[in-house]
Amino acid sequence: MPDDFSFTEADIADGPKTEVAQGLINRLSRIYSEGVPFAAPISIFRTDEVDLVRCVLQMLQGFSSSLFYWDHSEQSFRAKNGIYVTHLSQTSLFVILNQFMYGATCLQLVEVFVSKVETSSMRLPPPTLKAFANSVCSWLKRLRSVALKEEMKMSSSDTRTSPTLLGLANALSSLCSGAEYLLQVVRGAIPDLYFEPETCVPAGEMAVHILDHLYKKLNEVCLVQGGEEEAYQMLLYLFVGSLLPYIERLDFWLYDGMLDDPFEEVIRTREYFSCFAIHC
């Protein structure tokens, strides 16, 4: 046999044993790690926590990433398979991630609502609805800017400490709760049937419904929380923003003597405020 193909008994003994041992370790790791909360996963499947934090922040800004994606059929953000970190069990990890995915889903659904109002080909949005959608869009950007600032902070060269998932959960708790509350307000202010093609809701009734809903929410938050919480600031911003068309038309009427109200919102809104004044 030529020298190129020569081998010793040690080569015969060591080679196959090494391959068998590595294969056995991998198999045992897969068998005993599956379903065990605190079992360490195989190292090649572990997720870098810095990348995980960055993907969470991108998701909160409305973007899909290598670890999270928007499920159009379920209308929610989902996590891709194979996310592991060394210091958290799968149960603990997804308790934290579910909080972020739910908050990001709420923000994305709010964006879907704004898009429906702006791009609806069925009808021209009345002024109050459009003003409400614009105010919601501005507050949505404000919430997402919090995540953007956190991502920019990560990219800053001055940052010496690595961000952690637990630290992010603590820093963005108000963002997630604000996202949930914003979606609740939007769904309460705009009935789902408005976007159905067969339904025709008069602009005046829509304006009264939006303003009435926001005013009642303002009263609830003000009485319970003393007007010092983020929820109160958000509701006040949406309420004042939704009143702008009404104020502009009144201003034009008082100073120019003309009432431009093609959607007949001013009359219905005036009736609403008259009833409110009598009730008070």
Image (cartoon, rainbow, N blue to C red):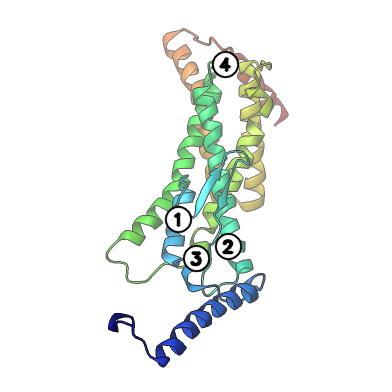
Which residue is the site of mark 2? 96
Q: Residue at x 62, y 74 (%)?
A: 33
- Residue sitting at 63 percent across and 23 percent down? 195
Outermost residue on the front side: it is: 1
Quarter of the picture holding the C terminus: top right
User: Disc 2 marks which amino acid?
Assistant: Ile
Residue at image mark 4: 122
230 vs 200: above or below: below
Of pointers 4 and 3, the one earlier in the residue sequence: 4
State which quadrant residue 4 falls in: bottom left
59 relative position to 27: left or right? left
Q: Residues within 10 Å of mark 3 (few under 14, many from 20)?
A: some
Disc 1 crowd rating (10 Å Cα; few below 14, some 14-19, many 20+) is many
The image shows residue 164 at horizontal and vertical percentages of: 46, 68
Q: Residues within 10 Å of mark 2 (few under 14, many from 20)?
A: some
Q: Amino acid at mark 3?
A: Leu
Q: Quadrant of the N terminus?
A: bottom left
Q: Earlier in the sequence, mark 4 or mark 1?
A: 1
Q: Where residue 181 sits: x, y (%)? A: 61, 46
Q: Nearer the viewer, residue 7 or 140?
A: 7
Q: CA distance from mark 2 to mark 3?
A: 8 Å
- Mark 1 and mark 3 lie on one chain; the one further toward the N terminus is 1
Q: CA distance from mark 4 to mark 3?
A: 44 Å
Residue corresponding to mark 3: 165
Q: Amino acid at mark 4?
A: Met
Does label 2 or label 3 sit earlier along the sequence?
2
Residue tagged 1: 55
Give the structural element (helix, strand or loop) at label 4: loop
Please provide percent x and percent y for residue 65: 45, 50
Q: Identify the secondary structure beneath mark 1.
A: helix
Left or right: where 173 falls relative to 31: left
